[in-house]
Image: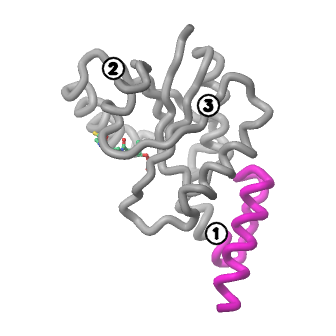
Amino acid sequence: MRRAIFPGSFDPITNGHLDIIGRARRLFDEVTIAVLVNIDKNPLFDLEERIELIKASTAHIAGIRVDTFDGLLVNYADRQKIYCIIRGIRAISDYEYELQMALMNRRLAPHIETVFLMAAEPYSYLSSRLVKEVCKLGGSTAGLVPEVVEKKLLEKFKFSQKG
Ligand code: PNS
Protein backbone atom coordinates (compact mmCIF):
# COMPACT_ATOMS: atom_id res chain seq x y z
CA MET A 1 0.00 0.00 0.00
CA ARG A 2 1.37 3.41 -0.97
CA ARG A 3 1.14 5.89 1.89
CA ALA A 4 2.06 9.56 2.23
CA ILE A 5 1.93 12.34 4.78
CA PHE A 6 0.55 15.77 3.96
CA PRO A 7 1.79 17.99 6.81
CA GLY A 8 0.82 21.56 7.60
CA SER A 9 -0.62 24.15 9.95
CA PHE A 10 -4.08 24.10 8.34
CA ASP A 11 -5.22 27.34 10.05
CA PRO A 12 -7.67 26.75 8.43
CA ILE A 13 -7.85 24.16 5.62
CA THR A 14 -8.56 25.80 2.24
CA ASN A 15 -9.75 24.59 -1.15
CA GLY A 16 -6.10 24.77 -2.22
CA HIS A 17 -5.21 22.15 0.42
CA LEU A 18 -8.17 20.04 -0.75
CA ASP A 19 -6.93 20.26 -4.33
CA ILE A 20 -3.53 18.91 -3.26
CA ILE A 21 -5.16 16.20 -1.12
CA GLY A 22 -7.21 15.04 -4.13
CA ARG A 23 -4.10 14.93 -6.32
CA ALA A 24 -2.16 13.07 -3.63
CA ARG A 25 -4.93 10.48 -3.32
CA ARG A 26 -4.62 9.72 -7.02
CA LEU A 27 -0.97 8.78 -6.41
CA PHE A 28 -1.22 7.22 -2.94
CA ASP A 29 -3.68 4.72 -1.45
CA GLU A 30 -3.69 6.50 1.90
CA VAL A 31 -2.88 10.10 2.77
CA THR A 32 -2.34 11.12 6.38
CA ILE A 33 -3.07 14.78 6.97
CA ALA A 34 -0.68 15.66 9.79
CA VAL A 35 -1.58 18.82 11.66
CA LEU A 36 1.25 20.67 13.40
CA VAL A 37 0.34 21.02 17.10
CA ASN A 38 2.41 24.06 18.02
CA ILE A 39 2.27 26.80 15.44
CA ASP A 40 4.71 29.64 16.20
CA LYS A 41 2.34 32.29 14.97
CA ASN A 42 -0.85 32.78 16.95
CA PRO A 43 -3.38 30.42 15.34
CA LEU A 44 -6.93 31.59 14.72
CA PHE A 45 -8.23 28.05 15.19
CA ASP A 46 -7.05 25.86 18.05
CA LEU A 47 -5.86 22.33 17.35
CA GLU A 48 -9.26 20.70 17.93
CA GLU A 49 -10.99 23.18 15.61
CA ARG A 50 -8.38 22.69 12.88
CA ILE A 51 -8.82 18.91 13.10
CA GLU A 52 -12.62 19.14 13.09
CA LEU A 53 -12.60 21.37 10.00
CA ILE A 54 -10.23 19.01 8.16
CA LYS A 55 -12.35 15.98 9.06
CA ALA A 56 -15.57 17.69 7.96
CA SER A 57 -13.96 18.90 4.71
CA THR A 58 -12.48 15.51 3.76
CA ALA A 59 -15.27 13.19 4.99
CA HIS A 60 -16.26 12.50 1.36
CA ILE A 61 -12.76 11.34 0.35
CA ALA A 62 -11.77 7.72 1.03
CA GLY A 63 -8.27 6.84 2.24
CA ILE A 64 -7.71 9.93 4.39
CA ARG A 65 -6.41 9.87 7.96
CA VAL A 66 -6.18 12.96 10.13
CA ASP A 67 -3.50 13.03 12.81
CA THR A 68 -1.39 15.54 14.75
CA PHE A 69 2.34 15.87 15.19
CA ASP A 70 4.82 17.84 17.22
CA GLY A 71 8.59 18.10 16.93
CA LEU A 72 10.43 17.14 13.77
CA LEU A 73 8.28 16.04 10.86
CA VAL A 74 10.76 13.34 9.82
CA ASN A 75 10.65 11.80 13.31
CA TYR A 76 6.87 11.65 13.08
CA ALA A 77 7.14 10.07 9.61
CA ASP A 78 9.52 7.44 10.97
CA ARG A 79 7.19 6.63 13.86
CA GLN A 80 4.35 6.24 11.36
CA LYS A 81 6.56 4.22 8.97
CA ILE A 82 5.48 6.55 6.15
CA TYR A 83 8.40 7.60 3.98
CA CYS A 84 6.84 10.13 1.65
CA ILE A 85 5.99 13.76 2.42
CA ILE A 86 3.65 15.72 0.16
CA ARG A 87 3.95 19.49 -0.18
CA GLY A 88 1.89 21.75 -2.41
CA ILE A 89 3.55 24.38 -4.57
CA ARG A 90 1.49 27.34 -5.72
CA ALA A 91 3.96 29.72 -7.32
CA ILE A 92 7.71 29.90 -7.88
CA SER A 93 7.92 31.99 -4.70
CA ASP A 94 6.93 28.92 -2.66
CA TYR A 95 9.73 26.90 -4.16
CA GLU A 96 12.71 28.40 -2.35
CA TYR A 97 11.35 27.78 1.15
CA GLU A 98 9.96 24.39 0.17
CA LEU A 99 13.29 23.36 -1.35
CA GLN A 100 15.11 24.36 1.85
CA MET A 101 12.69 22.34 3.95
CA ALA A 102 12.84 19.32 1.66
CA LEU A 103 16.64 19.33 1.59
CA MET A 104 16.88 19.77 5.36
CA ASN A 105 14.43 16.91 5.83
CA ARG A 106 16.49 14.83 3.41
CA ARG A 107 19.66 15.57 5.36
CA LEU A 108 17.94 14.54 8.59
CA ALA A 109 16.33 11.45 7.05
CA PRO A 110 17.69 10.45 3.61
CA HIS A 111 15.20 7.58 3.33
CA ILE A 112 12.24 9.99 3.34
CA GLU A 113 11.26 11.54 0.01
CA THR A 114 9.42 14.84 -0.50
CA VAL A 115 6.99 14.99 -3.42
CA PHE A 116 5.88 18.42 -4.67
CA LEU A 117 2.43 18.68 -6.22
CA MET A 118 1.29 21.74 -8.16
CA ALA A 119 -1.98 23.28 -7.03
CA ALA A 120 -4.62 24.02 -9.70
CA GLU A 121 -4.26 27.52 -11.13
CA PRO A 122 -7.37 29.03 -9.47
CA TYR A 123 -5.72 28.28 -6.11
CA SER A 124 -2.29 29.64 -7.04
CA TYR A 125 -2.77 32.80 -4.96
CA LEU A 126 -4.73 31.21 -2.11
CA SER A 127 -3.36 30.89 1.41
CA SER A 128 -4.84 30.40 4.87
CA ARG A 129 -3.33 33.75 5.88
CA LEU A 130 -5.05 35.69 3.06
CA VAL A 131 -8.35 33.89 3.62
CA LYS A 132 -8.32 34.98 7.27
CA GLU A 133 -7.45 38.56 6.35
CA VAL A 134 -10.17 38.79 3.68
CA CYS A 135 -12.82 37.42 6.05
CA LYS A 136 -11.69 39.62 8.93
CA LEU A 137 -12.05 42.70 6.73
CA GLY A 138 -15.52 41.73 5.53
CA GLY A 139 -14.71 40.14 2.14
CA SER A 140 -16.25 36.95 0.84
CA THR A 141 -14.31 33.69 1.10
CA ALA A 142 -16.91 31.70 -0.86
CA GLY A 143 -15.20 29.24 -3.20
CA LEU A 144 -11.86 29.67 -1.44
CA VAL A 145 -12.58 27.42 1.53
CA PRO A 146 -15.07 24.60 2.19
CA GLU A 147 -18.50 25.86 3.35
CA VAL A 148 -17.96 24.51 6.86
CA VAL A 149 -14.77 26.60 7.13
CA GLU A 150 -16.49 29.68 5.72
CA LYS A 151 -19.18 29.39 8.41
CA LYS A 152 -16.62 28.99 11.17
CA LEU A 153 -14.57 31.95 9.92
CA LEU A 154 -17.66 34.17 9.95
CA GLU A 155 -18.49 33.05 13.50
CA LYS A 156 -14.93 33.80 14.67
CA PHE A 157 -14.79 37.28 13.24
CA LYS A 158 -18.35 38.25 14.23
CA PHE A 159 -17.51 37.20 17.76
CA SER A 160 -14.23 39.11 17.81
CA GLN A 161 -15.87 42.23 16.38
CA LYS A 162 -18.50 42.23 19.15
CA GLY A 163 -15.78 42.02 21.72
O1 PNS B 1 1.26 24.71 6.49
P1 PNS B 1 2.69 25.11 6.73
O2 PNS B 1 2.75 26.12 7.86
O3 PNS B 1 3.36 25.59 5.48
O4 PNS B 1 3.47 23.78 7.21
C1 PNS B 1 4.82 23.81 7.59
C2 PNS B 1 5.24 22.48 8.26
C3 PNS B 1 4.32 22.15 9.41
C4 PNS B 1 5.21 21.37 7.25
C5 PNS B 1 6.71 22.66 8.77
O5 PNS B 1 6.82 23.84 9.51
C6 PNS B 1 7.20 21.50 9.61
O6 PNS B 1 7.44 20.42 9.10
N1 PNS B 1 7.32 21.71 10.94
C7 PNS B 1 7.73 20.68 11.87
C8 PNS B 1 9.12 20.94 12.44
C9 PNS B 1 10.18 20.44 11.49
O7 PNS B 1 10.28 19.29 11.14
N2 PNS B 1 11.04 21.38 11.07
C10 PNS B 1 12.14 21.12 10.17
C11 PNS B 1 11.66 21.23 8.73
S1 PNS B 1 13.07 21.43 7.73
For the residue with label 2, is its CB less than 8 Å from the closest atom of ligand 1? no
**Residue type, mark 2 in image:** Ile
The residue nearer to you, when weighing 41 against 132, is 41
Locate residue 15, reporting x and y percent: 68, 45
- Judging from the image, what secondary structure is the residue with disc 1 in? helix
Q: Which residues are magenta?
A: 135-163
Residue with the most extreme bottom position: 163
Q: Quadrant of ligand 1?
A: top left
Residue of label 1:
134
Disc 2 from disc 3: Cα separation: 19 Å
Residue 143 sits above or below residue 34 on the image: below
Q: Quadrant of residue 118 in the image?
A: top right
The local crowd at label 2, few if under 14, some if 14 to 19, many if 20 or more residues have their Cα within 10 Å, is some
Reading the chain from its start, which is encountered first: label 3 or label 1?
3
Q: Residue 90: tell me if it is visible.
A: no
The local crowd at label 1, few if under 14, some if 14 to 19, many if 20 or more residues have their Cα within 10 Å, is few
Dot label at residue 112: 2
Locate residue 159, reporting x and y percent: 70, 82
Residue 156 sits above or below residue 59 on the image: below
Q: Magenta part mainly helix, strand or loop?
A: helix
